[in-house]
Image (cartoon, rainbow, N blue to C red):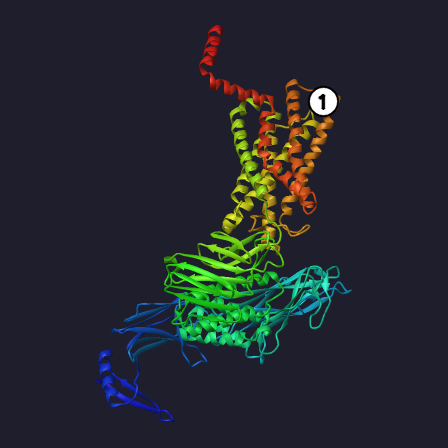
């Protein structure tokens, strides 16, 4: 070739291969080089590959780039080739790693003579030497460029020694010494951080943390000693670890150090656990060759809870790192995926020896590969088999006695398994069976009839291929949102190839042992991934001897549930819906009548006050009833709609009672302070402040408390209502307490009204006001038992639900309260003579407009 300058030859020690490095002072085309190689191949019985530098131009960032900044590299060549690829070589590792699309990197797909790579976040993982390569056959042209990142730690772990500052000492002026340690992984390239510690007990500048020298190469520790003055009696000390790089970027990590005083509850020291303040969690390091920690919580009562072992084996931790890199776009190739699933199968086979940390990490690996499989094509029969075996191994060992943690893990597990079953493509495999999971594949069949783990399945579909997987020991781990039911032991999941273009119907026959008990009701349910709950929508269940038959018009994960006791009453539901229908219609009629006769009936202040309260009570009850009906089928509502309905019902029901309180207080004031009547403006301001401000504060504080500071949630998405978790536990008490207090106050108002009516001097006062007062008193005496009495009935039902009177109370409360709107119409309109007269006047005018006009005309003429 033209421009030849020199040739360097290197032969391997065993003589099996040789490298030739040629330097040329010129540019050439790939086609010309390909012809020369073909000529060499004809004379040499060996494979030849050629790699060049100098023909590709790379544009890469210069100098140190900011941490987590967006960066772009691109390469171009004055030629046309078939493929391109990107690699990164990190410091201390001579083997380059391939780069593909991931959550932190985008690689351009078009690359015949140009390619680009975009770093969405320049973190320590992406610090290194980048190489772009254009390839055609056995010829590759490459260029390299370094990307240097001004690093910051991607993760900081803070610990203190001791973990609880013990101020439970006789000397109140004692100062407790605490060592705070910030731990990071070694950076990918040499870097010097400025590390400081900010503590809530310090009034001055943050303290400088000292780097520990000569410690383990696995971590880098920065330490600082602080003093905790017991006299300040702060319940916790807040420490903040701050790492800063040369470009003044920083990253922080916080740690709260509990301080124990003589009035606080605590857990006694139990080796190796030290004395710990109630409500705090203590940790211990893992044994050698494991990462993570072992934690133990001291509950609010000062009692130790069981240990939770979050230690992860070195092998599983290494796989977790590989999956994390895979997701980000580093070494995201099918070959690496095969290695990951093979390693996971081998390291999860320990069965009962797996710790909670191992189980969490393994499910995290499955979840990570499920996410990555949406962008990286995975097609390998052995990969599917290793995945099934790995997932099956997890179901052979207990996970944790913490129900909340177990439910969270099981939801992630099922989601990952379903996605991987769909995304891992098969070549010739007909399925794979493991101890806890069975996979079966149907191809080119309109109807797929299979028996999988004892469940008979008939799947009708137009898809070319369908996969069915059955999982044992999973159903009892998933949260059961349908109360008083038990789950079948098998979960069956069916998926279609290109599911969006095909339809399917599935029938499942779950075996059921009815020798021990006969279920009161059976459910055919599917797992709704978005809502993380079981749902009956689109499924029908029936019982046949010893089999539960499920028929569904869609595909997902199915199971069957059967109840141990009745969970609902069709009669009560019918009464509720009929009563609410009557109530809503009555309230609409009431509001229309009030609008029609308003100017005629609110001439006095008392009438204005009373009807203002009644209108707002009716409006709140109307909106509450509509919200109740809208959430009648909570399993069909999405989570956002369910949450909105809970807020609406909570607010409007409580607002109705606060307006009842306004009405009762107004009447008490009028009866007690006869000669000091309320001004209209004052009442309107007070009533609207109480009527709508009270429920706003009640609902707002309740929601904030249960969403931020309580371990329990604000509402139950299976009922779309507040939660009851026991005496003085659960958000339902944010409804019961204000309703109970106001109901008792209303009953007190009724007693005062009755006592006032019995007094002989009540007749004093203006005739018009006296007549109005009598009308109001009569209406309130009738209204108060309706509102207060019925809700007292509800409280009796609440406390005596399991007694022999429970059923009667249920029916009585349902009937009376579902008809509240009707009672308001009767007492607010039909029970007041002035309103009846005005309504009758409008009716007569509407029926005989001509005669009325004649009377008006005659009257007008006679006056003239």
- Could you say where residue 221 lies in the image, as x and y percent from the top left? 58, 74
Specify whether 367 is left or right of 225: left
Helix, strand or loop at label 1? It is helix
Q: Pick the residue in front: 296 or 238.
A: 296
Count numbered badges in the picture.
1
Specify whether 353 is left or right of 448: right
Give the quarter of the image for residue 494: bottom left
Q: Pick the residue in front: 88 or 39.
A: 39
672, above or below 371, in the image? above
Looking at the image, which residue sits at the far bottom?
Answer: 14
Q: Residues within 10 Å of mark 1 (few under 14, many from 20)?
A: some
On the question of residue 735 being in view, the answer is yes
450, above or below 660, in the image? below
- Could you say where residue 26 lies in the image, as x and y percent from the top left? 24, 81
What's the residue at 52%, 50% (across, down)? 635
692, above or below 425, in the image? above
Residue on which the image places disc 1? 762
- Could you say where residue 783 lies in the image, as x and y percent from the top left? 64, 31
Looking at the image, which residue sits at the far front?
Answer: 545
The quarter in which the N terminus is drawn is bottom left
On the question of residue 104 being in view, the answer is no
What's the residue at 30%, 79% (across, down)? 140
Q: Pick the residue in front: 25 or 705.
A: 705
What's the residue at 32%, 70% (across, down)? 115
Give the quarter of the image for residue 653: top right
Q: Pick the residue in front: 772 or 429.
A: 429
- Could you say where residue 618 lies in the image, as x and y percent from the top left? 57, 33
């Amino acid at each position: 070739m033209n421009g030849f300058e020199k040739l360097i030859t290197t032969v391997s020690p065993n003589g099996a291969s040789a490298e030739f490095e040629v330097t040329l002072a010129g540019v050439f085309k790939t086609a010309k080089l390909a012809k020369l190689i073909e000529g060499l191949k004809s004379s040499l019985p060996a494979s030849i590959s050629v790699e060049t530098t100098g023909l590709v131009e790379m544009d890469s960032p210069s100098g140190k780039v900011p941490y987590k900044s967006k960066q772009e590299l691109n390469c171009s060549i004055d030629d046309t080739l078939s493929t391109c690829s990107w690699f990164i070589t990190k410091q201390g590792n001579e083997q380059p790693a391939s780069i593909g699309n991931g959550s932190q990197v985008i690689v351009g797909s078009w690359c015949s003579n140009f390619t680009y790579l975009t770093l969405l976040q320049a973190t320590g993982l992406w610090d290194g030497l980048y190489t772009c390569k254009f390839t055609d056959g056995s010829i590759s042209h490459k260029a390299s460029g370094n990307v240097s990142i001004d690093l910051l730690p991607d993760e900081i772990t803070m610990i203190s020694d001791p973990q609880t500052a013990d101020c439970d000492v006789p000397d109140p002026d004692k100062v407790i010494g605490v060592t705070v340690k910030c731990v990071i992984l070694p950076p990918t390239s040499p870097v010097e951080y400025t590390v400081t510690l900010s503590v809530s007990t310090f009034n001055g500048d943050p303290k400088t943390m000292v780097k520990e020298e000569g410690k383990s190469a696995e971590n880098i520790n920065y330490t600082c000693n602080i003093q905790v003055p017991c006299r300040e009696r702060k319940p916790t000390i807040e420490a903040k670890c701050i790492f800063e790089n040369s470009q003044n970027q920083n990253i922080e990590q916080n740690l709260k150090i509990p301080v124990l005083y003589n009035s606080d509850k605590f857990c006694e020291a139990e080796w190796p656990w030290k004395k710990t303040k109630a409500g705090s969690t203590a940790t211990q390091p893992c044994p050698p060759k494991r990462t993570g920690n072992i934690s133990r919580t001291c509950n609010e009562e000062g009692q130790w809870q069981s240990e939770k072992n979050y230690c992860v084996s070195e092998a599983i931790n290494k796989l977790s790192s590989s999956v994390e890199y895979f997701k980000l776009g580093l070494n995201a190739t099918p070959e690496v995926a095969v290695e990951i699933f093979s390693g996971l199968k081998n390291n999860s086979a320990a069965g009962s020896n797996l710790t909670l940390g191992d189980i969490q990490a393994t499910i995290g690996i499955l979840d990570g590969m499920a996410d990555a499989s949406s962008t990286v094509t995975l097609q390998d029969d052995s990969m599917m088999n290793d995945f099934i075996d790995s997932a099956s191994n997890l179901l052979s060992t207990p996970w944790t006695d913490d129900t909340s943690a177990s439910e969270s893990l099981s939801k992630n597990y099922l989601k990952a398994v379903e996605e991987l079953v769909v995304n891992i493509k098969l070549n010739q495999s007909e399925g794979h069976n493991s101890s806890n999971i069975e996979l079966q594949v149907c191809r080119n069949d309109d109807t797929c009839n299979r028996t999988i783990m004892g469940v008979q399945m008939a799947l009708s579909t137009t898809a070319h291929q369908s996969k069915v997987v059955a999982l044992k020991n999973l159903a009892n781990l998933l949260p059961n949102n349908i109360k008083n039911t038990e789950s079948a032991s098998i979960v069956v999941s069916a998926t279609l190839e290109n599911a969006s273009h095909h339809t399917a119907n599935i029938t499942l026959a779950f075996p059921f042992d009815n020798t021990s008990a006969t279920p009161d009701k059976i459910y055919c349910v599917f797992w709704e991934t978005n809502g993380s709950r079981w749902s009956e929508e689109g499924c029908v269940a029936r019982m046949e001897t010893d089999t539960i038959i499920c028929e569904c018009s869609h595909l997902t994960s199915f199971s069957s549930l059967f109840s141990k006791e009745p969970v609902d009453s069709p009669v009560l539901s019918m009464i509720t819906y009929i009563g609410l229908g009557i109530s809503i219609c009555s309230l609409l009629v009431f509001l229309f009548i009030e609008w029609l006769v308003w100017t005629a009936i609110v001439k006095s202040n008392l009438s204005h006050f009373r009807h203002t309260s009644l209108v707002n009570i009716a409006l709140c009850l109307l909106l509450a009833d509509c919200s109740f009906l809208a959430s009648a089928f909570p399993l069909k509502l999405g989570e956002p709609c369910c949450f909105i309905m809970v807020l609406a019902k909570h607010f409007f029901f409580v607002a109705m009672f606060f307006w009842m309180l306004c009405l009762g207080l107004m009447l008490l004031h009028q009866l007690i302070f006869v000669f000091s009547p309320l001004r209209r403006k004052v009442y309107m301001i007070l009533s609207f402040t109480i009527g709508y401000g009270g429920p706003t504060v009640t609902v707002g504080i309740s929601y904030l408390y249960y969403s931020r500071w309580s371990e329990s949630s604000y509402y139950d998405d299976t009922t779309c209502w507040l939660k009851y978790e026991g005496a003085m536990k659960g958000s339902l008490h944010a409804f019961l307490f204000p309703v109970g207090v106001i109901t008792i106050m209303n009953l007190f108002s009724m007693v005062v009204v009755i006592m006032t009516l019995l007094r002989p001097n009540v007749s004093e006062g203006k005739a018009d006001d006296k007549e109005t007062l009598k009308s109001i008193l009569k209406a309130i005496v009738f209204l108060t038992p309706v509102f207060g009495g019925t809700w007292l009935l509800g409280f009796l039902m609440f406390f005596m639900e399991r007694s022999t009177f429970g059923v009667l109370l249920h029916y009585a409360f349902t009937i009376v309260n579902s008809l509240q709107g009707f009672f308001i119409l009767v007492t607010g309109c039909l029970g007041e003579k002035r309103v009846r007269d005005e309504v009758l006047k409008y009716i007569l005018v509407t029926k005989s407009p001509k005669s009325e006009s004649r009377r008006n005309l005659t009257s007008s003429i006679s006056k003239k």
